[in-house]
Image (spheres, coloured by chain):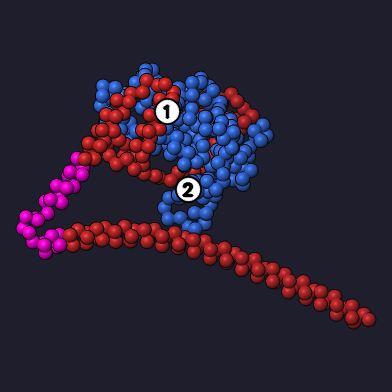
Amino acid sequence: MGPTDEELVEAFRRGDLAAFDVLVRRWDRKVRGAIHRILGSEDDARELCQETFLKAYRALGSFKGEARFSSWLYQIALNLCRDRMRRRKGRMVSLDELEEDGKAIPTGRPSALDLVEARDLARAVATAIAALPEEQREVIVLKEYQELTFVEIADILGVPLSTVKTRLYRGLGQLRVQLERQGIHRAAPVPAALS
Amino acid sequence: MECTVLRDEMIEVLYGEASPRAAQAVEEHAAVCASCREELRALRYLREDLGAWRLRESVAPRGLGSAPRPWRWPAAAALFLAAGATAGFALSEARLTRLLEARDARQRQEIAALRAEVRSIPLSLQDDSAVLAQVDARIRQSEARHAVFLKERLTDLADQTDAQRRYDLARVSAGLSYLDGRTGQTVARTAELMGYVLQASQKR
């Protein structure tokens, strides 16, 4: 068990520059994955992830430690995502990008048809998530793919727990609708109120 | 969902964050409420589907203390300096400089270590054939590593090609079956039309 994030932050403040290295290595993949799924672009994810850590580096001196380091890092990343979305004016990622990125890898030794079906499902999921309203997409990504707790998500977004759950529930409902529309029928029929 | 009595608790159960009490409440409710039971089942299926979207694994960053390839720190540092200057941040330029200097120092150490390794080759013997033999051995080692790498890549490629071939064959087979069906229908239709023509000619 290595040092905690907070211990590394403290070490960095005392002048141990390598501590920041450890933080980058520890969180880069997670932050990059979150940005990738929110913006739907691997290139954007790579770019904004670097920017996230640069901002973090710059502001680490003034980091109060009231929130967890990871929550603070996600906050920076989400703000960058929102800025990028605003500049895009809501334009979502192209299907070609999703095609490239949304590959599912079935376990075991899949048949060719398994591979095709899995790729189609991954593509459908990526497309459905891209179509969600920003607030719901953020919560879905943080919960479903980053596996954060409700409390952590509420902390990152600065909203009450109940809001997180409501956004999550609505987001899941929207995803069911979207997947139904794309011909994914495994889920139970969507209630009329959601469609 | 028609029933919203335990909606928050159901979400907690779905993600394994419910307290034992909430979990029990949901379980008891689902036992008597078909709507919630179905909702929970559908959401679990949906979560399985969401798991299908996996991202490609890319190279993890090596951070500041090692090779800067994924992070391109010099460019990032320049960006950082520019952004800090324009935004009027109390930019810890000295700290960044120290950071970059530390990295340079580490790289210099690595280079020095490599040079030492090269020097360790027994040139002192002034024996060209020994040096050549060592170089030759290094080249063979490198080639062996590349051969293993190439073999792995070829195996991957063969697997992918095989999967694609099986898929293409399945599609061709499905297409032929379809054409067979169409041909059969056409023959039957032609025979039927011929029958009509014969009947008509016989009436005349």
Q: Which chain is red?
A: B
**Residue B131 among those drawn in magenta:** yes
Instruction: Indicate left or right for A47 with B111 as reference.
Output: right
| Circle 1 SS class | helix
Q: Main secondary structure of the magenta part?
A: helix
Residue B18 placed where, x, y %? Answer: 46, 26
Q: Amino acid at mark 2?
A: Ala
Residue nearer the viewer, B55 or A118: B55
| Circle 2 SS class | loop
Instruction: Indicate left or right for A65 with B136 as reference.
Output: right
What is chain A's hue in the picture? blue
The answer to whether marks 2 and 1 sit on the same chain is: no
Mark 2 vs 1: CB contact within 8 A: no
Height in image: B198 above or below B17? below
Residue nearer the viewer, A123 or A108: A123
In the rendered image, the residue lying farthest to the left is B125
Say the numbered circle drawn on residue A104.
2
Q: Give the quadrant of the C terminus of chain A.
A: top right
Instruction: Indicate left or right for B167 with A193 as reference.
Output: left
The magenta segment is B109-134
Residue nearer the viewer, A119 or A107: A119
Q: Which of the 4 quarters of the picture holds residue A66? A: top left
Instruction: Kindly identify which chain the residue marked by label 1 belongs to.
Output: B
Say the numbered circle drawn on residue B83.
1
Q: What residue is at 57 percent from the left and 66 percent from the top?
A: B172
| Separation (CA) of disc 2 from disc 1 | 38 Å
